[in-house]
Image (spheres, rainbow, N blue to C red):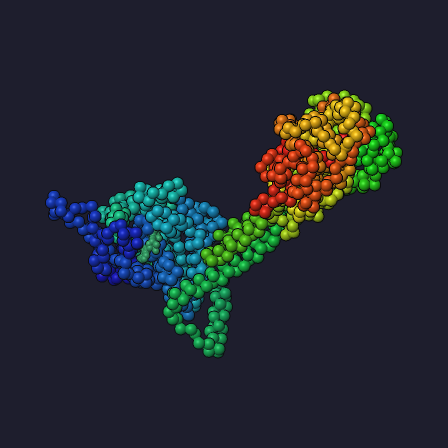
Amino acid sequence: MTTEKHSKIGGEQTLTVALRVRPMNEDEILMSSSIAHKVDDNMVILLDPMEDPDDILRANRSREKHFMFDYSFDSNSTQESVYEATTKILIGNVINGYNATVFAYGATGAGKTYTMLGMDDDPGIMARALNDLFLEMEKTSEDMAYKVTMSYLEIYNEMIRDLLQPSSGILDLREDAKGGVQVAGLSEVMARSTVEVMDVLLKGNKQRTQEPTSANKTSSRSHAVLQVTVKQQNRVRNVMQEVRVGKLFLVDLAGSERAANTLNRGKRMVEGAHINRSLLALGNCINALSDKNGSKYVNFRDSKLTRLLKDALWGNCKTVMIAHISPASAHFEESRNTLVYADRAKHIKTKVRRNVTDVSFHIAQYTNIITELREEIMRLRHRLHDRTPVKPPGRVNIQSVHSEVLEAKLNADKEELNKLKEQLLISFADQMELRKSLMELNNSSMEVSLETNRNQMIISEWESERVKAVQRHNTGDNLLTDSEKALELSGAGSDDIPETEEVRVARDELKVLHDEKHKTEKIRTTVHKELDLAKQKTRKLEELIPQKINIEDHREILSLLVKVHELEITNTEVQTSCLLRDFQIKKKDMVIARHRQQQHICDQIIKRQRRIISENNLPCPKALEDLLELYNKERDERQLHRDDSDHLNLDQFRSKVPSTNGSRLNLPGETEPLDTLQEESEPAMSRKNTQRNSRSINPGDKLFDQTPSSAWQGDMEEEMDHLQLAPSRLSQEDRNTILSNTRSIVALAAKKRSKVQNNKLNFEKQASDHKTLHSSSNNMKYSGDTDIYLSTNTLAKHNTKFIEAPVSLPSLNKFPSEDNISIGTKLSTNTDSTLPPIRQEDKNAVPRRIPPERDLKRMKRSRAYESSYQYPYGKPVPRSRFGFENGKSDSSIRDYEANTPGVRWPSRRHYRGQGSDSSAVSTPQNKNRKGIPTIPRYRKGDITVTGFGLPRY
Ligand SMILES: Nc1ncnc2c1ncn2[C@@H]1O[C@H](COP(=O)(O)OP(=O)(O)OP(=O)(O)O)[C@@H](O)[C@H]1O
């Protein structure tokens, strides 16, 4: 019966209402029960989940609500069956000039879009209807001429947008003279085939506002209206020509939603409010239209949706409403509302009539008609002649059409992808090129800066030398360094000292570097600007990706491309920062070089001042002496520290900072470029300091001609070399121990020497008193002084012997190496076997490296005395006398002891250094138990140091 009613066209028609119950989704299956069931093709029942079946008071009330519709569908119904039952029948009517509307109604997520649009592999009503439309037209195309146009719009937040031409903006609704509603400015696209129609449809859907909500991941946030207009005309022109215009409206409404349930906020909530308002207006219209008395006022003006659907609900239109519900108990309220509205809509009546226009022609137009008719005859004759078999109108498979459309879409997407990819690659390449140029510019400006520094240093060094030379000229100082002499020779002393070639070149280079710097800056600004533009261009292209590319894989390709580019940028940034670090290191080296240069100058000043003080016998305040001592100490320690850290730190640094160009990083004192740099930045100093190795210090640059510690250090290094022990392998602590021990030795020696001088004076006196002693130098008698402590006299004698002894000491000008310290020790113990160990009290004597002024004077006097002294006891005993050098030792000692009454040779234990205080003396040759060379530990009072002079002031 319903099919009959549905197929009947023309006259008063009631709305055809179908209900579709979608299948439950996974969440609903887990959380809810099914409450909507299709009973038969027309009946649906809805259970109220809230009503308690055990409630006695409501025992007579049924929990079930029955609803009757023209058609009912459930989860087993296919897209095709829904289409065939609800829409297919309308297609013929539309071709014949009737208006028809199919609209999907229901709560959000109930399945409206699924029914209207469907899926790629299972198209919905829209695609199927359009396909059938063309198939139907094909059937009568021999006699009839058709013109199909399409428009597609959406009502989003009460604004009308053209989905086929989104650039048109917001469109207005207008009413024509006959009360018909028109959308002003809506584009109409001609379609000649199903493929074209589908293409237009896909294009429009892409523009439709669809957002994920808590209720539906692909929620349509707008009402979409697809309008297809079919104009039909007989191919054979008559004087009275009939033109039929049928319109098919396919409407996918947005779903009503309960704000409390959807949890939508912000933009989604505003959209929801608009959707609900327009659906409420539709509901009101349905209410009014379904009133049995027909007395209610129907307000179509409440929303744009109702104004658009006015004809569909009330006017000349065959209308089908497909209501959708979810069977889940969680959506009971929404489903019940939909069912109630759908039930009311059944009573809405429309008056359907054919839209025909009769065109009567004037005589003037007959000639044209005749010409057209002749043309038509010719066309038909040609067809007959060619015997071209006319393709029988067959049924085209909607799925193959759809896949054809999809393929076309894929190809179009591929084309876009290639275009965009090419543009992106060009833009990336441009950007990288600019970044590289920028890096090169940075590099060259760093080079310029370093070169500028270097040249400035050459000039400033020369300036300071010039000032010194001028001053010296004025004061008549002749103690000049080579370069200073060169300056002197070249006319120093006057203000117009000619510049050296090096300085001239430096000045010229500075000018060129200055220009270079400005040029580089200018280019850098330009490159920066270009880079900004390139970045903008790339950004715009990246923004185009989601707009132009629809296929996920293609988007992925482009986003990977972008990522690669970003990684390349990061790489260049890392390279730039490495370069910058290199530069900073070089700059710091420059600063260090400058400091060294300054220190060198300070040393020169101090050295000369000392010379002036000593030569003129000027009194030097103690505070100044102390300061000098402190200065020396600091200087020595710094030198030691630098030796160590030069190697350690730079090795560590090299391992941390990667080289930017793959080559070894330039490290000062180690690799060529920084050596060169250092040499360049320290021209005066470095060139002088090229002895032995980079750590050695030229004696000419020393504060004193022979500073004990540094001279000793030189020897120490020699010693180490001899032992094949690299000095750098000593730890800092060991070095400090050696240094402090050496100082103690030096200080102790100074003290003892001064003591010796005093004793000498006493001894002189004694010598004159005891002439007998002078005559028997081989038979030394020590006046029974056999206690274990040294008397003043014996100590004096002992020391005098060593001071003047012509033994093969390493060198008097040389400072003690460990070896000559030990030699000295041996001598002190061996040569004068009668001497007991040095007084214990001496150990506690506080050593003074720099003797006070009065000591200095006394020492001078002593030196004068020493040189005139005639060895009162004869020549000192030769070193080899006791065979210590060749290992004869014990028996010789015993013989000697026996022959020399009262004389006891210090026990071997002492000599070997095993237990007594003197045992602490060891040499680098001595090794500890593990065979590792020990660091000598000297203690105050252990030894008598000989073989070196006091520092000369
Ligand atoms: N008959 C059906 N068979 C299988 N899946 C369906 C069916 N109906 C709906 N669905 C699925 O349910 C989900 C919601 O459907 P759809 O988007 O069509 O709802 P809607 O009513 O259009 O929602 P909204 O109003 O929020 O746009 C989709 O994932 C859809 O694939």
Q: Residue at x 38, y 51 (%)?
A: 218
Q: Give the residue at x 68% y 42%.
A: 892
**Camera-nearest residue between 508 and 46:** 508
- In the picture shown, does residue 877 fall above or below 287? above
Q: Where residue 744 appears, x then y in whole percent?
A: 66, 32
Towards the viewer: 60 or 229: 60
Left or right, 922 with respect to 301, comes to: right
Relative side of 683 to 139, left or right: right
Whether 279 is drawn above or below 709: the answer is below
Quarter-of-image position of residue 913:
top right
Identify which residue is drawn at 13% across, 45% down. 55
Q: Nearer the viewer, residue 849 or 649?
A: 849
Residue 497, given in percent of the width and then of the height, sits at: 86, 33
- Using the rendered view, name the quadrant where residue 508 is placed: top right
Residue 149 place in picture, x, y as percent: 43, 58
Question: Is residue 928 visible in this depiction of the protein?
Answer: yes
User: For the point 59% across and 39% down, which residue is it?
Assistant: 914
Quadrant into which the C terminus falls: top right
Ligand 1 lies in quarter: bottom left
Looking at the image, residue 898 lies above or below residue 94: above
Residue 702 appears in view = no
Q: How many marks?
A: 0
**Nearer the observer, 585 or 631:** 631
Q: Position of residue 601 (x, y in %)?
A: 75, 32
Q: Quadrant of the N terminus?
A: bottom left
